[in-house]
Image (cartoon, rainbow, N blue to C red):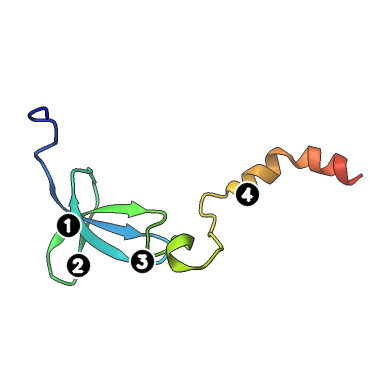
């Protein structure tokens, strides 16, 4: 195995699922400009997530995924003329 392959600057980072507010702390090298103070009174760098295991349909058993990025709307706007032609 190569030496010095992995980064040395691991630190505790808070990850927050923006769809439901669930926050967990783990070690990471990901950079962040935002910070958050948790229940333990410590301040951690904050990384915002769109989806995590706490809100993902596969892990929750709910088969509906909330579209936060508007992908369905983008698709419908892009192909609206094709859809209208098909309807007529």
Q: Is residue 58 left or right of residue 23?
A: right
Whether tag 4 and tag 2 are in contact, CB under 8 A, the answer is: no
Mark 2 sits on what residue?
Answer: 38
Mark 3 secondary-structure assignment: loop
Q: How many badges with numbers are in the image?
A: 4
Mark 4 secondary-structure assignment: helix
Mark 1 sits on what residue?
Answer: 44
Image coordinates for residue 63, horizontal then vertical, percent: 55, 64
Image coordinates for residue 37, horizontal then vertical, percent: 19, 64
**What whole-number distance in Å separates the C-alpha atoms at marks 2 and 1?**
8 Å
Question: Which residue is situated farthest in the right direction here?
Answer: 88
Residue at point 31%, 59% (across, down): 16
On residue 81, the disc is none
Image coordinates for residue 51, horizontal then vertical, percent: 41, 56
Q: Earlier in the sequence, mark 3 or mark 1?
A: 3
Q: Earlier in the sequence, mark 1 or mark 4?
A: 1
Whether tag 3 and tag 1 are in contact, CB under 8 A, the answer is: no
Whether tag 2 and tag 1 are in contact, CB under 8 A, the answer is: yes
Mark 3 sits on what residue?
Answer: 21
Q: Is residue 68 above or below residue 22?
A: above
Q: Earlier in the sequence, mark 2 or mark 3?
A: 3
Question: What is the crowding at mark 1: few (fewer than 14 residues within 10 Å), some, or many (at least 20)?
Answer: some
Mark 4 sits on what residue?
Answer: 72
Quadrant where the N terminus sits is: top left
Q: Earlier in the sequence, mark 2 or mark 1?
A: 2
Q: As rendered, which of 6 and 37 lies closer to the eye?
A: 6
Q: Is residue 33 above or below residue 59?
A: above
């Amino acid at each position: 195995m190569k030496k010095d392959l992995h980064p040395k600057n691991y630190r505790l980072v808070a990850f927050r699922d923006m769809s439901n507010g669930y926050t967990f702390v783990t070690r990471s090298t990901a950079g962040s400009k935002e910070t958050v103070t948790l229940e333990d009174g410590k301040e951690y760098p904050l990384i915002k997530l769109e989806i995590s295991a706490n809100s993902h349909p596969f892990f929750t058993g709910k088969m509906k995924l909330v579209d936060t990025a508007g992908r369905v709307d983008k698709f419908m706007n892009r192909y609206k003329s094709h859809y209208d032609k098909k309807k007529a």
